[in-house]
Amino acid sequence: MILRDGRKGFKKFLRFTLAMILILMPMIAAAQTAETQLAEPVQESPAAPAEQGDYKTGRALFSGEKRFTNGGPPCISCHSAGVGELGGGILGPNLSQIYAGPKRALLMIGWVNSPGLPVMGPIFSAKNITEAEMEHLRVFFSETATQPVAASKTGSFLGAGAAGFIGIMIFFSIVWSGRYRKRNKGTAHDALWRNYGGKGGK
């Protein structure tokens, strides 16, 4: 009976691990596909007027090293732009080339602070980005647009997370089997565990 319960528990663990792999793999593939689609060649666009902001301040605002005046979240929590250890968030599009194309017009506080945006609206309509902060961000994006599009680190991060999760589950499975063996030591259950090839056999 106990041996059968042990086997059932291990089968449940395997099913759970496989289910997690099946859930995580499409997420990794989707993140990598999104980054590939967004990494399109930069198209020529009309020359922009010289921006008045500061690159370092814009980068700090994007990455969260410097807080927005009105308390809005940093851009990197939802977007990527080729900076940061993990490359940034994947909820929103990659902004590394936004300044180089027709979407440059979106780098206006009237658009970013608009309550009509489905995700950003509820946040930044209450915690507005200032014009000075947007000027710094525009200078930052004008620089990222001149750089080659870097490979996304997000897919690698998700893959490492999935591998770590599976490793932790295997570790706890080994610990669980050791506790089971210890609890039943010196009983008929321990003899069954050894005789039928259990991990606790000597």
Image (cartoon, helix red, strand yellow):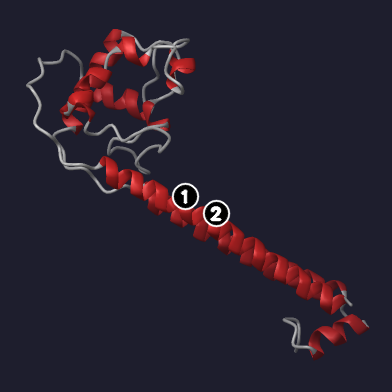
At 39% from the left and 11% from the top, the residue drawn is 114
At 40% from the left and 38% from the top, the residue drawn is 90
Among the 4 quarters of the image, the one containing residue 174: bottom right
Q: In the figure, is residue 201 to the left or right of 110? A: right
Say which element carries label 2. Answer: helix
Circle 2 Cα neighbour tier, 10 Å, few/some/many (<14 / 14–19 / ≥20)? few
Q: How many marks?
A: 2
Q: Which quadrant: the C terminus?
A: bottom right
Circle 1 Cα neighbour tier, 10 Å, few/some/many (<14 / 14–19 / ≥20)? some
At 74% from the left and 88% from the top, the residue drawn is 197
Query: Can you say whether 44 is above or below 61 in the image?
Result: below
Query: Can you say whether 8 is above or below 134 in the image?
Result: below
Amino acid beneath label 1 = Met
Amino acid beneath label 2 = Ile
At 39% from the left and 51% from the top, the residue drawn is 155
Among the 4 quarters of the image, the one containing residue 124: top left
Where residue 169 appears, x then y in whole percent? 63, 62
Instruction: List the residue tagged with mark 2.
Output: 23
Say which element carries label 1. Answer: helix
Where residue 24 appears, x then y in whole percent? 51, 54
Q: Are marks 1 and 2 in contact (CB under 8 Å)?
A: yes
Instruction: List the residue tagged with mark 1.
Output: 27
Between marks 1 and 2, how big is the CA–CA gap? 7 Å
